[in-house]
Image (cartoon, rainbow, N blue to C red):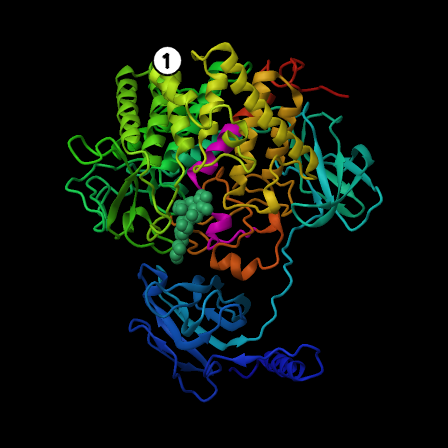
Amino acid sequence: MVRLVAAAATAGLLAGALAGGASAAPTVKAEEVINGTFDSGATAPWWWTENNPASVVDGRLCADVPAGTSNPWDAIIGQNDLPVTAGETYALTYTASATSPVTITTNVQQATDPYTQYFTSADQLTAEPKTYEQTFTAKADDDAAQLAFQIGGSSSAYTFCVDDISLDSGAEVPPYDPDTGSPVRVNQVGYLPDGPKKGVFVTDGTDPVAWSLKDANGAEKASGTTTPKGVDASSGKNVQTFDFSSFSTPGEGYTVTIGDQVSEPFTIAADVYSELRTDALQYFYVERSGIAIDGSIVGDKWARPAGHVNEGANQGDNGVTCVASDPCDYTLDAAGGWYDAGDQGKYVVNGGIAAATLLSSYERTLTAPGASKDALGDGKLRVPEHGNNVPDILDEARWELSWLMSMQVPEGQPLAGMAHHKLHDAQWTALPTQPTDDDQPRELHPPSTAATLNLAAAAAQGARLFQPYDAAFADKLLASARTAYAAAKAHPAVYAPATDSTGGGAYNDDNVTDEFYWAAAELYITTGEDSFKSDLTGSELWGQGEDVFPKGGFYWGSTAALGALDLATVPNKLAADQLTEVRSEVTGAADGYAADATAAAYGQPYAPEKNAWVWGSNSSVLNNAVVLATAADLTGQAKYKNAVLGAINYILGDNPMNQSYVTGFGERATQNEHNRIYAHQLDADLANPVPGSMAGGPDNALEDPTAQAKLVGCVGAMCYIDDIQSYSTNEMAINWNAPLAWVASYVDDLGTVPTVAGDGGHHGGHHGGHHH
Ligand code: 9MR
Ligand code: 9MR
């Protein structure tokens, strides 16, 4: 311990006095760490890796860390043999500094492979010693856990010093109290001039209060009183709402003031969602594998060399064979496709739903009144394929469709025509890891029926959309879809197991009724052939709207909705009464989501059973919005359109966290999504994620160590943290950005296209100067 930390010493005494004192339920505090203060000058029992020799300097343990190691754990200072008990809460405290600004990883974890983490945090160190105080509840018994300061991975050499290290059992979990900024909540991007404009005021008060809408100069433009709503289920907080829908003058820098509380600023404009549309789609380009990301397209900060093509340390996806536990005697050239998320795995079920959602965003423009084909057309998005006369959104989808087809088992092999479930690293890699630095073996995991049907569905949809642009590619897609579908029928119950989650996610699924429905629907729409129709109408999901459209939203594990939405909107040969039935399932589901949106203070069309917000909940909100928007396209009813706008308001800041979940959009936007490439939070030389990428959002099951340490006690939609380590609340993923892009495209059309469905035909084009 260094001399000057008198405050810390006093705090320690005080804590000791309290623990031994008159408190009703005495908690037993016990120090686990040995020699955490370095008072005697001794270093034992601390250990360190050979490359960063440590010694006691001025009462602190200091180590010279070399430049140029690649992983955090390539340089460590640690102590072993710390007993931790499942269910026990620990306070972990330390004071650390670094001579150049670095982010280290501090873990309490298993001391041996697989190094399961009980606690992890990313700590940004500076030259000034900083004290970290953290609590966590251990998830397992371990009589010899390890405290590890992982100080490697820095491009420059530096000196790390640490002192006053303590791990105390018997800690109390502090009440969950996130910084949520102003209690006045709005869509931080803004509103359409003619659309609904609503917000939320978080307050203990139960009487209506006055709100005031001000312009950028502070002049009042509208005013009114709030509506008390009681306790909002999604957050457990008392709230009131306000509504300034009747104000429609375009402008920037508006705010809503209640008492002395001011909202974040927002815009009112017809094109308020135009950038969101293109940026949500540029996310797919930066996630492309197997191609260099061109800085002149997305900005130099996000440029990088091609990933997984046998360059640098990685072995490449161009010649991948099967995992040793399930060998095959062939290799596939499965380079290309999109990385799934923050990891660099590629998964057919998730790739299929994401590609299909982009295809549907385009296909909507062929059928929906007032949808803009132009905004997604050639030259309009950030893709390298400009000037090929193919709509840019189809170019982007093609990148994935081609990869999906490459995952098929070759002819002549057992399971020919099936799709391998996934391709990823043998072991999880560290954050950050650039694709070219990924030295893990890449492996094909066994085929599954779900993956095979996902490929069949997405490829069949692609076949009809590419027909006018590239007939040969369309034919290839359809042939691949047919082969896959036949293979799935021949092997209808090959399931990916939940246990296969080392080095990549499991995407396990043991119910493929929905995938069969989806694939049969797409093949039927594309070909009109009776065999697909009889499979479709013979499905146990046929006519079962509530199962086709689950209340919690469709997702990669429940895909029938994608088929039903297309049957309802894309011309096909269903009989009139069958078409009516499918359309009524869409509007029936939309009625439910619209009712949820109306009941919710924050207006989101998502009300999960038991308030259980799932991993990727933001995509549930948006997939429900896709159903709502389709219902609006089919019927022209404003209630559906308004619920879609409720979803987008929720995503962009009108929510319990006062958080815009889309990078680069809004004053309080997510910045530190879980991603190995754009890991700025861990390495200042790297960029943050590209604008337009959406965080998964609140997950109250607390499914990663950071969530387990930082979010204890959170309610529903408040279980979120903008920390790169929180992969269960703050990852980005292709299947989540796809509905963001779909919905952004829809709401942008609402504002910028002259005749728009869902508005009863009242739009008169652009809205400048439309006053009430
Ligand atoms: O980083 C991974 C993330 O992309 C996945 O969504 C998540 C769940 O499958 O698992 C990952 O996280 C790993 C982490 O980066 C390192 N420790 C092991 C974690 C997986 O259990
Ligand atoms: O989106 C997936 C979510 O539904 C699951 O609950 C979760 C845990 O299995 O995995 C999510 O998918 C991750 C995948 O396993 C690995 N790549 C990142 C994905 C998003 O976090």
> Badge 1, how many Cα within 10 Å: few under 14, some, many 20+?
some
Determine whether, in the image, residue 502 is placed left or right of residue 604: left
Front residue of 760 and 56: 760
Instruction: Considering the whole magenta stretch, tell me its main secondary structure.
Output: helix
Q: Amino acid at mark 1?
A: Gly
State the SS at label 1: loop
Q: Position of residue 252 (x, y in %)?
A: 66, 32
Q: Position of residue 522 (x, y in %)?
A: 39, 22
Q: Quadrant of residue 330?
A: top left
Determine whether, in the image, residue 3 is placed left or right of residue 330: right
Location of the C terminus by quadrant is: top right
Q: Is mark 1 within 8 Å of ligand 2?
A: no
Q: Position of residue 277 (x, y in %)?
A: 51, 29
Front residue of 266 and 529: 529
Front residue of 156 and 131: 131
Query: Residue 731 colored magenta?
Result: yes
Front residue of 16 and 558: 558
Residue found at x 35% / y 47%: 497
Residue found at x 55% / y 30%: 546
Q: Is residue 476 above or below residue 740?
A: above
Q: How many marks?
A: 1
Query: Residue 212 colored magenta?
Result: no
Residue found at x 71% / y 47%: 183
Q: Which residues are magenta?
A: 720-744
Q: Quadrant of residue 268?
A: top right
Q: Is residue 66 above or below residue 520?
A: below
Q: Is residue 732 visible?
A: no
Find disc 1 in the rendering and name its residue.
Answer: 528
Determine whether, in the image, residue 672 is placed left or right of residue 256: left
Q: Is residue 430 visible?
A: yes
Q: Residue furthest bottom?
A: 40
Q: Position of residue 591 (x, y in %)?
A: 63, 27
